[in-house]
């Protein structure tokens, strides 16, 4: 059974940093593209950063130069390093794993809260 579990959220002041982790189990990690999404109150869920199984990386424009995504095959884990956080980064951050060739094989975690205050 596939499982995706986020950790590392919390509260931080603007300008601070947080590191998120997403551990997976029950899937062949190297066959999955990974992504971090966030959802702010009253807004739709949006892509923050993604890394393919081949480590091709995409960032949403608002986080370019501040966030960094990486994956560790040995730990079946994907990371999101968030620096210079802004209030508008506040939201629930979700991790997604999707099979590179079977896009319906998509798994979500329950999310972790990130709160940035001024």
Image (spheres, rainbow, N blue to C red):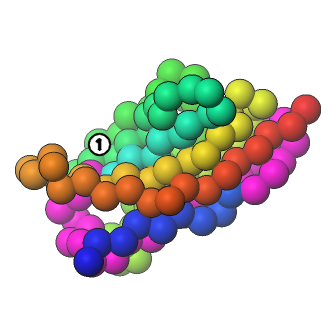
Name the spot of residue 111 as percent of width and height, x first: 54, 55
Q: Residues within 10 Å of mark 1 (few under 14, many from 20)?
A: few
Residue 56 higher or lower than 8, as above or below:
above
Quadrant placement of the C terminus = top right
The number of numbered discs placed on residues in the rendered structure image is: 1
Residue drawn 76% across the image and 31% down it: 86
- Residue drawn at point x = 44 percent, y = 53 percent: 95
- Residue toward you, 30 or 46: 46
Side (left or right) of 9 relative to 28: right
Secondary structure state at the residue bearing disc 1: loop
Residue 20, position in %: x, y? Answer: 59, 58
Q: Residue furthest top?
A: 61
- Magenta span contains residue 32: yes
Q: Quadrant of residue 30?
A: bottom left
Q: Can residue 73 be seen in this view?
A: yes
Residue 66 visible: no
Q: Mark 1 points at which residue?
A: 56
Residue 118 appears left or right of 106:
right
Q: Is residue 43 left or right of residue 102?
A: right
Picture layout, residue 77 above or below residue 55: below
Instruction: Tell me where the magenta segment starts and ends, as one range.
Output: 10-33
**x then y, percent, for residue 41:** 65, 33
The residue lying furthest to the right in this view is: 118
In the image, what residue occupies the spot 38% across and 42% down? 50
Query: Residue 69, relative to residue 46: is it above or below?
Result: below
Residue at position x 24%, y 72% from top?
27
């Amino acid at each position: 059974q596939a499982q995706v579990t986020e950790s590392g959220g919390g509260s931080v002041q603007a300008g601070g940093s947080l590191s998120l982790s997403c551990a997976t189990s029950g899937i062949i990690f190297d066959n999955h593209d990974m992504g971090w999404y966030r959802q702010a109150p009253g807004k739709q869920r949006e892509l923050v950063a993604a890394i393919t199984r081949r480590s091709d990386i995409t960032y949403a424009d608002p986080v370019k130069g501040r966030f960094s995504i990486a994956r560790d095959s040995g730990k079946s884990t994907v990371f999101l390093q968030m620096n210079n956080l802004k209030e508008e980064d506040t939201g629930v951050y979700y991790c997604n794993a999707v099979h590179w060739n079977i896009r319906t094989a998509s798994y979500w975690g329950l999310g972790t809260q990130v709160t940035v205050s001024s």
